[in-house]
Image (spheres, rainbow, N blue to C red):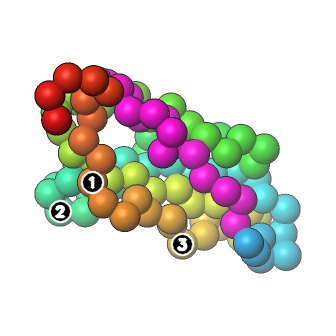
Amino acid sequence: MTEIARDYVILAWERPSSDGNEQLLGYEVEKSMAGGGGTYVSAGYVDAGTLSFRVTRLHEGCDYMFRVSAENRVGLSQPATTERPITVKLPFGKH
């Protein structure tokens, strides 16, 4: 994660160490409200050359989990998931 604001988060990641011997097509980015039973919904998709994504439509003060899956011709990889919930809020003020 590189930036948190009151209604968005910018996530960043590294290329996977293995591509399954297939060219990477892109990355699926998903979000889930923490405590929401682990249900993830798509936040967007980026091409294989992009290693960051601005997740929008978030609610200030809410906690979210995020995950990113690499995709190749065979399908999606196991997702890389944030280790702990991220609270969406202004970067200054009361914590």
- Image side of residue 11 versus residue 5, left or right: right
Q: Residue at x 45, y 57 (%)?
A: 67
Distance from Cα at disc 1 to Cα at disc 3: 19 Å
Residue at which label 1 appears: 85
Look at the image and give the residue range highlighted in magenta.
1-16
Residue 14, quarter of the rendered image: bottom right
Distance from Cα at disc 2 to Cα at disc 3: 19 Å
- Image side of residue 74 versus residue 38, left or right: right
Q: Residue at x 78, y 44 (%)?
A: 49
Front label number (1 vs 3): 1
Q: Position of residue 59 (x, y in %)?
A: 22, 29
Sequence-wise first label, 1 or 2: 2
**Residue 28 lies in the magenta-colored region:** no
In the image, which disc is placed on residue 54?
none
Distance from Cα at disc 1 to Cα at disc 2: 13 Å
Residue at which label 2 appears: 37
Residue at which label 3 appears: 78
Sequence-wise first label, 2 or 3: 2
- Image side of residue 39 versus residue 27, left or right: left
Q: Is residue 95 above or below residue 71?
A: above
Of helix, strand and loop, which one carries label 2? Answer: loop
Q: Residues within 10 Å of mark 1 (few under 14, many from 20)?
A: some
The amino acid marked with disc number 1 is Pro
Q: Is residue 13 above or below residue 81?
A: above
Front in this rendered view, residue 12 or 18: 12
